Image (cartoon, rainbow, N blue to C red):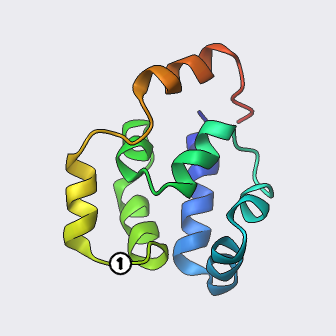
Amino acid sequence: MSVNIMEKVLWDLSVDRESKRRFQDDPEKFLSRYRLTELERRMIREFDVRGLADEGVSTMLTMGYWMETEGSRNIDDYLKRMQSPPRIGRDEQHTDKRKGSSRG
């Protein structure tokens, strides 16, 4: 996993209106600008804030990304998501790492 790159993406989505618009219009095209694995792109696309945090991404960035980009912009929903299991299974994350697909 490339934590620094994932954090850069979340920062861009949290503070830059044009990045938010591009992500909302076409998440895949927007994310293709960054050197991310498919698993990293999936966690961002699916708002898997718990999975991102479990991988070492700053929870301040996951919260900003959630509040600025996810449709509900609701802190209660964010906290519920953070308290639930990651959307993407740990086995899947570790399989992705063993394949050497991290390009960070």
Query: Label 1: which residue?
Result: 72
Q: Is residue 14 left or right of residue 73?
A: right
Q: Is residue 83 left or right of residue 60?
A: left
- Measured as percent of width and height from the top left, residue 4 is found at 59, 46
Badge 1 marks a residue whose secondary structure is loop
Residue most extreme to the bottom:
17
Q: Is residue 41 above or below residue 77?
A: above
Instruction: Choose between 65 and 27: the one closer to the eye.
Output: 27
- Measured as percent of width and height from the top left, residue 102 is found at 69, 29
Q: Is residue 81 above or below residue 26?
A: above
In the picture, the quarter occupied by the N terminus is top right
Give residue 95's quadrant in the image: top right
- Measured as percent of width and height from the top left, residue 55 is found at 44, 36
Q: Is residue 41 above or below residue 17?
A: above
- Measured as percent of width and height from the top left, residue 22 is found at 71, 76
Q: Name the residue rendered at 51%, 19% in the picture.
A: 94
Q: Name the residue rendered at 73%, 58% in the picture.
A: 28
Instruction: Choose between 29 and 17: the one closer to the eye.
Output: 29
Q: Name the residue rendered at 45%, 47% in the picture.
A: 57
In the picture, the quarter occupied by the C terminus is top right
The type of residue carrying mark 1 is Ser
